[in-house]
Image (spheres, coloured by chain):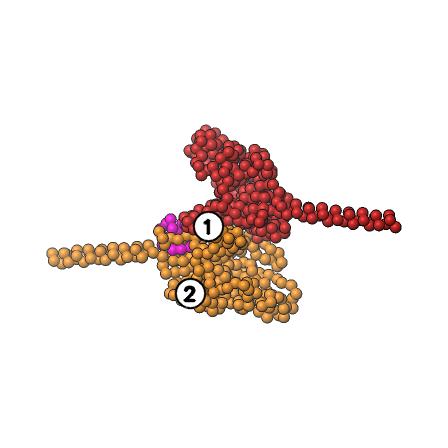
Amino acid sequence: MKANRFLDLLKYCVLIMLLLSNVAMAGEKSAPRKCILVFGAHADDVEELAGGTLAKYIAAGYEGIYVCVNNNTAGCVIENTQNPRYGRGTTFTVSKSPQLYPVDALETIQIRQEEARNAAAFFGATPVFLNFREIFIWQGRKECYLGSDEFHQYQPPGRQIISTGTVLSKDVNLVIDLLKKYQPEVTIIHTLGGEKDEHGNSAYLMYLAFTKAVSQGIPVGKLWMKVDGWLLDDIAMSSGRGKPDVQIDVKDFLKIKYEAFCKHVSQKSIFYKDYVERGQVKPEGMTERFITVLDNSK
Amino acid sequence: MNTTRLMRLFLYALVLTLLSVNFIIAGGGDKPRKCILVFGAHADDVEGMAGGTLAKYIAEGYQGIYVCVTNNLAGNQIEKVPGNWDFGSGKLTAAITLSPKMYQVDALETMQIQREEALQAAKVFGAEPVFLDFCEPEFWMGRKLIVYGSEEFIKFDPPGRKQISLATRYSEDVNFVVALLRKYQPEITIMHTPGGEKLDHGESGYMMYLAFKRAISQGIPVGKLWTVSRGWLADSVAQQSGRGKPDVRIDVRNHLKTEFAAWSKHISQNGGEIEKHIGLRRPARDRSFEEFITILDNSKQ
């Protein structure tokens, strides 16, 4: 009889402990992780969007997630490569060509993905490639966009283009899975409706995913966006619509930002390096500014 | 001799008159025209965005331009016809088709139906309809959704220009919208929220933003560009910070009848019973006022 009572007591204790641990776990789940996720459309957009902020948060012990949303089938110009005079005109010392030619689409994917990996490694961040299709490719000197016969016949790898991805649940869910996996305290996107096709649409894709993630109880924190496009126009600045509410001092992290930028050898990275080494960064470049779009931490 | 002098005088007078007329025309060209242009992505978006405002301005003597940006390849369900669908409760009655399921109407028929409905709606407003025919990013083939750029899409080869987000990249497409602004020189242009709504809405907004800026830089006399405050601008963070708060408020109480009459022409969307339909979807919204955010204002230049 006593043994039975003891067993009952033990059962109640185990049940109470299980309940308590569940409550504790639920409490843990509701807080985002010490993680920052920067959602760049192209291979070197993370640096431009929030390179200093990413470096600063990683230095403060945050996990850094370096996302490249599309697969970069375009954007390499062979004559730009390793050109120390970038931004001051081509030297033609390598190709001897007086003209600029875009690199083949598949090579461009490889080159830019490799560069992004090197840059992410420099930040100490985890690179993530979502492989949404870039909306065009170059074939020789012909630009072939999605929907054209040439694009279709070329069959570049990748998912939907980002804009179409925003219409389809499976693509939005892919981004929700990313948020579920990393549960970032801070997520940074391009300007909503403020920039060219893939920038604006990648921001909108994250906005949709973030909103859904919040509704599903996934512990994400704040969604910040860069201030660009119409938000930079006089009217938005004077009305206060375009005024950033988040300002991150990144002057101690500019070296990391621009060194990471320099890993994108096929782009204009060397020009940026010159800037830092010669101390030519303007005061406004010492701060990265954002607008809070959503705040789930409240 | 006298005749020659007279001829010369006459010629000078003619040249002076021509110069004056040109000067007057050029002067007139510096100001936008008394015209309002509503840039809706789909066939019935003009009404949802600014139907009351369009009706009000037209009643005040403005020329109204009713723009439909995409070619509406998708968005009709055959069962959603009056009698077969209860637009009040939002439920299928199946009284006509006897089908318990919903089927999508063919892309080309959808295009025709929605265009016809938009033509009739524009007529109710007394506005000029303009169809830009940018390609919808998807259509239905039976019960399969076909997306832009897929093999099925290319084989179907629907008519139309590029998909709207793609088009924002290309000068020829942006210039097509600039040409629209040059033609009408509207004092007021209204667009969807940039980056604030689903693909065609947000991107048609962005397209107009690009074209409007280009128009200003080219000296085309356009006036104000307004947007509706939706998407992230309607979220609590933007509302509390004031970013999403409209700065333009139009009293449309006396024009709701026209708005609803026009809106009800989109039978494939609302069964011709828009009041029941929006009552169901947005019961709390007061439609007495339409509100906008000023994105660009060229009238202050």
Residues tagged by mark 2 and mark 1 found on one chain of the structure:
no
> From the viewer's perspective, is residue B295 above or below residue B81?
above
Q: Look at the image and tell me whether residue A284 can be seen.
A: yes
| Residue positioned 38% across, 58% down in the render | B187
Q: Which residue is mark 2?
A: B56
Q: Position of residue A238 (x, y in %)?
A: 41, 49
- Density class for disc 1 (Cα within 10 Å; few <14, some 14-19, many ≥20) is many
Which mark is on residue A241? 1
Say which of marks 2 and 1 sits in front: 1
For the point 62% across and 42% down, which residue is it?
A: A33
Q: Secondary structure at mark 2?
A: helix
Q: Quadrant of residue B25?
A: bottom left
Between B115 and A176, which is closer to the camera in this rendering? A176
Q: Residue at x 56, y 33 (%)?
A: A122
Residue B101 circle label: none
What's the chain of the residue with tag 2?
A: B
Residue A259, position in %: x, y?
A: 52, 32
In what element is the residue under mark 1? loop
Q: Quadrant of residue A39?
A: top right
Query: What is the distance, in whole Å, between disc 2 and disc 1 at their CAs?
Result: 28 Å
Residue type (three-letter) at the residue carrying disc 2: Lys
Pointer 2 local density, CA inside 10 Å: few below 14, some 14–19, many at least 20: many
Chain letter for the part of the structure drawn in orange = B
Q: Amino acid at mark 1?
A: Arg
Q: In this rendering, does residue A230 appear at all?
A: no
The stretch in magenta equals B209-225
Does the magenta-highlighted stretch encompass residue B221? Answer: yes
